[in-house]
Image: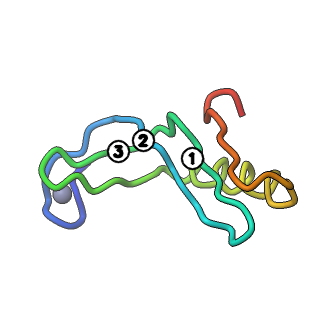
């Protein structure tokens, strides 16, 4: 797999995904991703994106201001 920005090599890595929902900030740790060794661009696979969406949907109605979840435990 090559980076769509700089055509560099993408390697398997993990990252911390953050999303601001307005009333709540969701932080998901240890999200598997492909990371470019050259420019640092990150891309997620389709199934990872689906799981991130599912986690966020679950947390949307949460009353906490900051929700931190571990991807592998979610
Ligand atoms: Zn790149």
Of 64 and 31, nearer the camera is 64
Q: Residue furthest top?
A: 73
Residue 54 location (% of width, % of height)? 74, 52
* Mark 3 vs mark 2, CA separation in Å: 9 Å
In the image, residue 57 above or below residue 1? below
What secondary structure is marked by label 2?
A: strand
Of 55 and 48, nearer the camera is 55
- Identity of the residue drawn at 42% across and 41% down: 15
What secondary structure is marked by label 1?
A: helix
Q: Which residue is mark 1?
A: 48
Foreground mark, 3 or 2, reads: 2
Q: Which residue is mark 2?
A: 15
In the image, residue 46 above or below residue 13? below
Q: Which residue is mark 3?
A: 34
What secondary structure is marked by label 3?
A: strand
Q: Is 8 left or right of 51, judged from the image as shown?
A: left
Q: Quadrant of the C terminus?
A: top right
Q: Residues within 10 Å of mark 2 (few under 14, many from 20)?
A: some
Query: Does mark 1 have its CB less than 8 Å from ligand 1?
Result: no
């Amino acid at each position: 797999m090559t980076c769509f920005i700089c055509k560099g090599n993408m390697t398997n890595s993990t990252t911390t995904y953050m999303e601001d929902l307005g009333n709540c900030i969701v932080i998901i740790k240890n999200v598997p991703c492909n990371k470019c060794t050259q420019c640092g661009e990150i891309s997620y696979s389709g199934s990872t994106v689906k799981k991130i969406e599912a986690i966020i949907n679950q947390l949307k109605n949460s009353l906490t201001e900051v929700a931190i979840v571990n991807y592998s435990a979610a």
